[in-house]
Image (cartoon, rainbow, N blue to C red):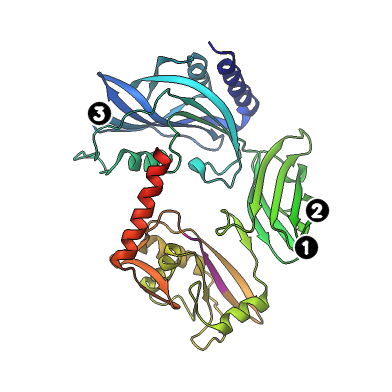
Amino acid sequence: MSSSHQKLIDEILSIIERRRPTYSGVSIKSALVKRDDAWWNYATKILPLHRSEQGVKKSMNYGNFALIEDFLSLSEFIEIIKKLPYDASVEIVLGDHKVRVEGHFVDGYKYDSGDDYLGIGWFFERYQYRPNSNPSNPKEPLVSSELPLFPRVHDAINEFIGIDLSRYSDSYGLLICLPNYGARIQEFRIGTTVVSIKVQALEVNEKDLVGKSYFEGEGKTMHQDILFENSSGQATLGFNPDRLHIALISRTTNEMIDRRDIYLSWQTLPRGVVVDIPEYEIMEMIQHGETETLEYKEGLGKPEEFAETVVAFANGIGGIVLLGVDDHAKVVGMTDPRIEDTIANVLRSHCEEPVEYNVERRKLGQREVIIIRVDEGEDKPYFVRDRGPYVRANGTDRIMSRYELDEIYREKYSEQSTLRY
């Protein structure tokens, strides 16, 4: 056995042992391919769950391809890790399947809580037991009279497991994700003079946390410690930063529990990052009228028309919907205490695929408005159900032309082909 292979196994076991009190067991979601009457691993995500969670068991068999979900104890999972060979195959049991896996471990990599890779949502180390060659696809589409239809194997893996092979083309084999459930950074709110940070602490007392910050911009740098109370902390800005780096540190163990590195020059901000717009800038935006990236409405209006605007922004470069401003650019305010739930229900019911957005309440003078920030979509085109794909043009929403739709698909599949090869 390779010494580096064994070293990585030892690292994995050490992390599991250190975090054992915070884990309940191990969720395993796997895609399998049948070859020569044996089941072989295709792509598998392995995730220890927080001690407040329990996993489930599930299986979908398409004949020569299967999707399974299993839940193992930590001890059972540790025994699997110990028996994984270097550049050879071994049989393991997942659900009711005997599965052949082969390959070798590659170096681990750390991801922060804001990274959308694998959809973990916590700071985690990822280790990959990678096969020597990418597995061949089974026959497509995946069809069964009693199971969901999937046009491609990659569609099934993305929906069932959460591995997007069109974006991360080398994510085959076993992906072992070891989250740190101590605490995480949930939200950055960046104003003109203050950065506010919200944290969620599951296994660490928030008073035992310190945020070590590094701000960079206008040719200057600044360091500042951030302390937390009631899950929130603040840092004062002395200039307009282009980059913010925050590390969440435990005072008792000196361990880094989470981190975020944010570049404000990015066209689309990462999940959980909000840049506060000063009140005077919002008023200027309103007075200049609706644009490619701004729509204002007195109220939510017809659900379908609201969804058209949100989808149009997602199909473009993103945008802002202001609720509480009438057609004459007068701020009339919004008083609905459940508007956030209504927005979520409308977009869930009318948008295909799900659109990324953020809702916040802001005071303009004596009245409250609702700001809905819509991110540029990563999975274009987006559709309004039963209506079609919309785009923004000259401050209004319209149905996308056939040419525009073809261009999006052409670019999308060109990117996927580049990633795959």
Q: Is residue 329 visible?
A: yes
Residue for badge 1: 239
Compared to residue 384, the image places residue 288 above or below, namely: below
Compared to residue 397, the image places residue 10 above or below, namely: above
Q: Is residue 267 magenta?
A: no
Residue for badge 2: 222
Q: Are marks 3 and 1 in contact (CB under 8 Å)?
A: no
Q: Going by the picture, which residue comes out furthest to the bottom?
A: 328
Q: Going by the picture, which residue comes out furthest to the left?
A: 145
Q: Are marks 3 and 2 in contact (CB under 8 Å)?
A: no
Which residue: 62% across, 59% down? 265
Q: Are marks 2 and 1 in contact (CB under 8 Å)?
A: yes
How much space separates mark 3 and mark 2, taking CA atoms? 57 Å
Which residue: 69% across, 54% down? 243
Say which amino acid is labelled 3: Asn
Query: Which residue occupies the foreground of this view, 63 or 138?
Result: 138
Q: Disc 2 or 1, which lies upstream in sequence? A: 2
Q: Residues within 10 Å of mark 1 (few under 14, many from 20)?
A: some
Question: What span is in magenta?
Answer: 370-376
Query: For residue 127, which quarter of the picture?
Result: top right
Q: Where residue 64 is drawn, which disc sits there?
A: 3
At mark 1, the secondary structure is loop
Please state the horizontal and vertical placement of residue 116, each as a whole percent of the image.
Answer: 52, 46
Query: For residue 90, which quarter of the picture?
Result: top left
Viewer-side label of 3, 1: 1
Predominant SS of the magenta segment: strand
Please state the horizontal and vertical placement of residue 188, each as a whole percent of the image.
Answer: 65, 56
Query: Which residue occupies the foreground of this view, 125 or 72?
Result: 125
Q: Residues within 10 Å of mark 2 (few under 14, many from 20)?
A: some
Query: Which residue occupies the foreground of this view, 332 or 63?
Result: 63
How much space separates mark 2 and mark 1, taking CA atoms? 9 Å
Viewer-side label of 3, 2: 2
